[in-house]
């Protein structure tokens, strides 16, 4: 079974707007890092350039009304309805080619899910995917089309059991909303609390409704939280729930904006905590459809994704250039020369506060959600 990277230069060249923080160019930067660290030359690995999604599949996660507005905005039309649907805002600017960009990026996630389902692949990574804020009838948070929702909907219609784990620093509200009453998908999002960060949601008491009650799990953490507290909370909640649910496929939204050097958010993870949760996801999953997501420190995000790729593929990075030219490194990563960060640990009263909050959240989930899964 193959490990597959979805990559195309066409996607990497897209710019929402030169000043917009969301950079599809991270896909190219990731590929460069994978080459440099000897992570993309195995016989069981393939790079695939995604096909655009069949337009009819957009309706799995969106209304025809919204898709129509989106298409017309791309063709240069303007209406107030578009703005009301989040199109043409600072977060979601209208840019030429955005419809094709959305079809290509959501096509990558959908195609990846098909290859996993057919048994052709064990792990697929679509780095310029993971648009977890896009809603049924609106764009939001840099997301236009919910690639994850489309691919998951298609699988559950065919009777597959799916787990969605979202480690992006922002709450995965779009995916939560699509499947809030659905027990065929177990959704778990761990993120910076909605008290301090967009999309201002994702509290622990949002546990799903009707048949979906207990199948939506949120782990909000305080601004400033470090690796240690994050990993403790993740390990307390995710493995028992995923084991009890027993998925066929796990979707992982692995946004790199949890990093402590991310300019738009305030958790303080390093590659150490990030890698640890990726390892756990990998061990829990029969098959993995990973998508990128946020990550606004471009180099750090690409480095985290390279480490995630290595972990899912069972490889250890080794730098081609280490020791060359007196140990000097080139490029923006010159100061680091490694994909990994030094450990960073918060101590004292501040740490106690992060831990107390995380413990309260974990207790709530253990009491309200675990029993629904017989644990
Ligand atoms: Zn994010």
Image (cartoon, rainbow, N blue to C red):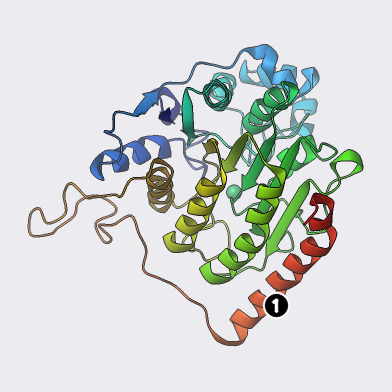
Residue 42 seen from this side? yes
The residue identified by callout 1 is 356
Q: Position of residue 138 (x, y in %)?
A: 75, 32
Q: Is residue 103 above or below residue 236?
A: above
Where is residue 88? Give x, y as percent: 67, 32
Quarter of the image with the N terminus is top left
Residue at horizontal 77%, vertical 35%? 184
**Residue 68: quarter of image:** top right
Instruction: Check disc 1: other Cα within 10 Å, few if <14, some if 14-19, many if 20+.
Output: few
- Whether residue 96 is visible here, answered yes or no, is no
Residue at left 74%, top 34%? Answer: 135
Question: Height in image: 137 above or below 284?
Answer: above
Residue 30 is situated, as x and y percent measured from the top left of the image, at 37, 40
How many numbered marks, from 0 up?
Answer: 1
Q: Secondary structure under badge 1?
A: helix
Q: Residue furthest front?
A: 374
């Amino acid at each position: 079974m193959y490990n597959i990277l979805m990559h195309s230069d066409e996607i990497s060249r897209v710019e929402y707007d030169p000043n917009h923080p969301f950079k599809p160019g991270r896909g190219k930067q990731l590929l460069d890092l994978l080459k440099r660290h000897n992570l993309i030359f195995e016989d069981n690995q393939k790079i695939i350039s995604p096909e655009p999604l069949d337009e009819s599949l957009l309706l799995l996660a969106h209304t025809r009304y919204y898709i129509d507005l989106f298409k017309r905005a791309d063709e240069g039309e303007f209406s107030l309805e578009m703005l009301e649907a989040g199109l043409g805002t600072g977060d979601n600017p209208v840019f030429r080619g955005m419809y094709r960009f959305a079809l290509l990026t959501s096509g990558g996630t959908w195609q990846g899910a098909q290859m996993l389902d057919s048994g052709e692949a064990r792990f697929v990574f679509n780095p310029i995917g993971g648009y977890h804020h896009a809603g049924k009838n609106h764009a939001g948070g840099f997301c236009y089309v919910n690639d994850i929702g489309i691919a998951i909907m298609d699988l559950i219609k065919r009777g597959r059991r799916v787990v969605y784990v979202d480690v992006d620093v922002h709450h995965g509200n779009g995916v939560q909303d699509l499947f809030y009453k659905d027990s065929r998908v177990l959704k778990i999002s761990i993120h910076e609390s909605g008290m301090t960060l967009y999309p201002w949601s994702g509290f622990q008491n949002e546990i799903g409704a009707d048949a979906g009650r207990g199948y939506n799990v949120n782990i909000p953490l305080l601004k400033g939280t470090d690796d240690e507290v994050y990993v403790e909370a993740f390990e307390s909640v995710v493995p028992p729930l995923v084991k009890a649910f027993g998925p066929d496929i796990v979707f992982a939204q692995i946004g790199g904006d949890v990093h402590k050097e991310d300019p738009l958010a305030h958790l303080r993870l390093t590659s150490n905590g990030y890698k640890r949760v990726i390892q756990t996801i990998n061990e829990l999953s029969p098959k993995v459809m990973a998508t990128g997501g946020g990550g606004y420190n471009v180099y750090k995000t690409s480095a985290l994704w390279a480490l995630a790729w290595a972990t899912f593929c069972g490889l250890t990075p080794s730098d081609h250039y280490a020791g060359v030219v007196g140990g000097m490194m080139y490029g923006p990563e010159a100061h680091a020369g490694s994909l990994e960060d030094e450990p960073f640990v918060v101590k004292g009263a501040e740490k106690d506060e992060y831990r107390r909050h995380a413990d309260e959240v974990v207790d709530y989930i253990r009491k309200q959600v675990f029993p629904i899964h017989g644990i």
